Image (cartoon, helix red, strand yellow):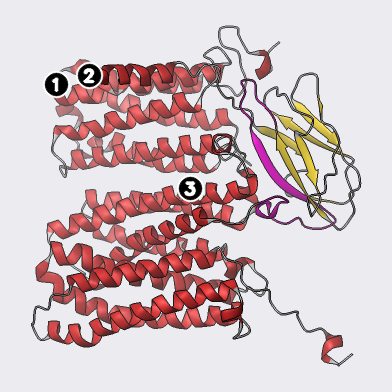
Amino acid sequence: MKRVGLLAAALAALVLPATANAHVVLSSAYPDTQSRLPTAPTEVRLGFSQSVTAGPSAIQVLAAGGRLLSGDVRVSDDGLVVSVPVSGLRRGDAYTIRWRVTGPDGHSPAGVYNFGIGVKPPPPTEAVGAGATTWKDDVARWLLFAALALVIGPLAVRLLVLRGPVPERLERRFHVVTTVAAFAVIDVGVAAFVVRASNALQLPLADLLFGDLTPFAQKTRFGVAFLVMTVGFAIVTALLMLAWTFDRLDLRWPAFALAALLVSGLSLSSHQGTEPGSSVVSELADWIHLLAACVWVGGVATLALLVWPAAPELRRRAFVGFSRLAVAVVGVLVLAGVYLALVRLPELSDLWETGYGNVLLLKLAIVAIALVWGGVHHTFVRPRLEAGGQPRVRASLVGESAVAVGVLLAAAVLTNVAPPPAPPASTPAAQSGR
Amino acid sequence: MVPRAEIAHWLAGSALLLLGLILLSEVIVGREVFRRRRWRAYLWPSLALAGGVLLWVVAIFSTFSTMHLFAHAIWAQAAMIAAAVQLAVVRGKLSSPLWSLVTSGALLISGAAFLVHEQNAWLFSRSAFLHHVIGWTCIVAAFFPLAQALQPRRAAWSVGFALTFVALAVLLYADRDVAPIFGHLSDVAGGR
């Protein structure tokens, strides 16, 4: 009876949304989103798809430091256009527009964007009043790294180490893990994108559901990376599903290649792609670093969680084969990581004097533990396996995987910490001693 | 350029119409005849899988509100999962009739997402009305795959399942960005 009541209540909730929120969307804007104007505007004008009501501060134009430059809001007779007069804007500066109106049924769509006068505006994530990244960003990025590792690692092991037929039980596990992880990449990617945008929107959770994410999706690097990775991983997921359904191992090659390529989306929108001093080389190094980490972390997890319990007869082959692959992968990982550290931390003292350096030190410490752990496996366990022994290493592999997941957490935090500013570029005047 | 909502909805309607007609063809000529050529059995699940992937494209153009982004993501995911399971059933990878619960679940979740994301009243505008009808159509239609699994020889359930997609296509074709429903359009939606 209680269940019937709950069902009835759930159905009633679906039937009677009635006068709740609306689909009001921003349909036009002057100044346009993230635009660069030649001269200072005297008015900010926002058009909406439905009639709205707006309080006196429904549109705020803010200068750096939070100085308010806008007056009282005016709403057109039909309620479709909201405008506000502005004054005191100067050429050469960028400004933030924060807007929030009320739709026909009480909910409040809201948005934020920047514009510049004679200058390119900063991305909306750097709008006036935007909050810094939080632990939510760290967790989202961590889960994204872990999901990527669980797509790429198992695929690398299956395609590069365990080529040819494998027991059906193991094959099924490969498919389940990679497909679920591919979906997780998409879902966590959506969540990470919304969390990042919410830092700038600064809205309570209920209002965030009506927040306008378009400036973040289309005018930021991480937004564009999110768009491409979402569709790209939908294709990866479809390929993995088809590979299992039709027993087509070859379909996993394009899935693997596409997933590896899409990892670059994170590199292009990371510090190595956006901070001063970034270059094509630093972006490439970051991509290789991340890809190698995914193969390594995901590969170790594959041995511990898939191969060991599901195919005892393949343990030796998988361990020895992955051990060889891991030497190359970890070598590339370390080389790329050292290069990136040199790019971001020009002074050695930055390691202990800056927050970025501190997190990097922590990450290096965890990496060192993982490397020693892996080195023990490579040096002591591998020869015993090659000699036909049956060492009990599953717990040790799980342990190494756990440490590697810790590395991913440190990497996620590092991604959200601003690196120290680059030293000022030397000018001809400075070079000549003047 | 971001496509207008109605254009995206018409494209989705076309895919659903094709899907419904394929299913209807199978009902009309009978499963044995329809599947005499093996590839025909894969037609509708393949189309649904492709549609699911394309829905992600629509999802990334739906960033004008977080709610719309989530709703489209749910539909895309539900379509892909239901289609993949159906492909596996046709292929013989999955055999339990209980797998039809996945299709039912996908329809239920999709319908609920429609109703939750459209919270204007039924007669607010045509699109609001259609969203309500589509949501409830999906929820009611979730019964058909379940009934098909329990009574596979009864054609009524297969007809109902096929016509669900035809009906959804018609509803989507009727969509306009701003238009009245039964002569009614809310003032706040631009009606006078």
Whether labels 2 and 1 share one chain = yes
**A299 over A252 or under it: above or below:** below
Q: CA separation, marks 3 and 1?
A: 40 Å
Residue under pointer 3:
A190
Q: What stretch is highlighted in magenta?
A: A101-130
Location of the N terminus of chain A (image quadrant): top left
Mark 1: which secondary structure? loop
Question: In the drawing, what numbered circle is on residue B157?
Answer: 2
Are discs 2 and 3 located on one and the same chain? no
Q: Is the stretch drawn in magenta largely helix, strand or loop?
A: loop
Which residue is at a point 21% across and 25% down the rendered structure image? B146
Within 10 angstroms of label 1, few (less than 14), some, or many (20 or more) residues? few
**Of residues B20 and A360, the one drawn nearer to the viewer in this rendering:** A360
- Could you say which disc has been placed on residue B151 in the image? 1
**Image height check: is A316 above or below B104?**
below
- Which is in the foreground here, disc 2 or disc 3? 3
Please give left or right for residue A184 compared with residue A160 in the image: right
Q: Which of B20 and A324 is in front in this view?
A: A324
Q: Position of residue A37 (x, y in %)?
A: 84, 50
Chain under callout 3: A
User: Are circles 2 and 1 on residues that touch, CB within 8 Å?
Assistant: yes
Residue type for callout 1: Gln
Identify whether A331 is placed above or below B40.
Answer: below
Q: Tell me the element at label 2.
A: helix
The residue at the point 9 percent across, 70 percent down is: A313
Does the magenta segment cover residue A107?
Answer: yes
Residue positioned 42% across, 79% down in the render: A365
Q: Amino acid under label 3?
A: Val
Q: Where is residue B57 in the image (x, y as percent from the top left)?
A: 49, 43
